[in-house]
Image (cartoon, rainbow, N blue to C red):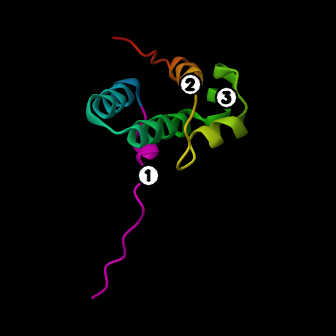
Amino acid sequence: MTVELMPFDPAKYLDNEETIREYIRYVMSDGTTEEILQAFKDVARARGMAQIAKDSGLSRESLYKTFSEGSKPRFDTILRVSRALGMPLTV
């Protein structure tokens, strides 16, 4: 018997603010740089990349570049995206 696996897409499950905040909080607490960028990308996709682009003042192309594998985005870009997501970075 062959088992067919479907790719997992976290963005499908990020459907409310509490879930989104817990997801980001969890990844930020112990995640690598790549995992944190992936989490931001998942949330941006769940909310709509076009809306995040508009709210951050970045182009959609710039966002896709920011979240591409191996990217090294500037801190300013991360701040703008985190604020657009409604999750400013705090200490």
Q: Nearer the viewer, residue 41 or 76?
A: 76
Task: For the residues labelled 3 and 1, say whether their Cβ atoms are less than 8 Å apart.
Answer: no
Residue occupied by mark 2:
81
| Nearer to the camera, 29 or 85 | 29
Q: CA distance from mark 2 to mark 1?
A: 20 Å
Q: Where 5 falls versus 17 (above or below)?
A: below
Q: Give the main secondary structure of the magenta stretch.
A: loop
Q: How many marks?
A: 3
- Give the amino acid at mark 3: Ala
Q: Residue at x 54, y 33 (%)?
A: 47
The quadrant in which the C terminus is found is: top left
The x and y percentages for residue 65 are 64, 42
Q: In terms of secondary structure, where does tag 1 sit?
A: loop
Point out the tag, 2 or 3, that comes first from the N-terminus. Answer: 3
Q: Residue under circle 3?
A: 53
Residue type, label 2: Val
**Range of magenta residues:** 1-15
Q: Nearer the viewer, residue 3 or 83?
A: 83
Q: Position of residue 3 (x, y in %)?
A: 31, 79
Using the image, tell me which numbered label, if any, was put on residue 9: 1
The quarter holding residue 90 reads: top left
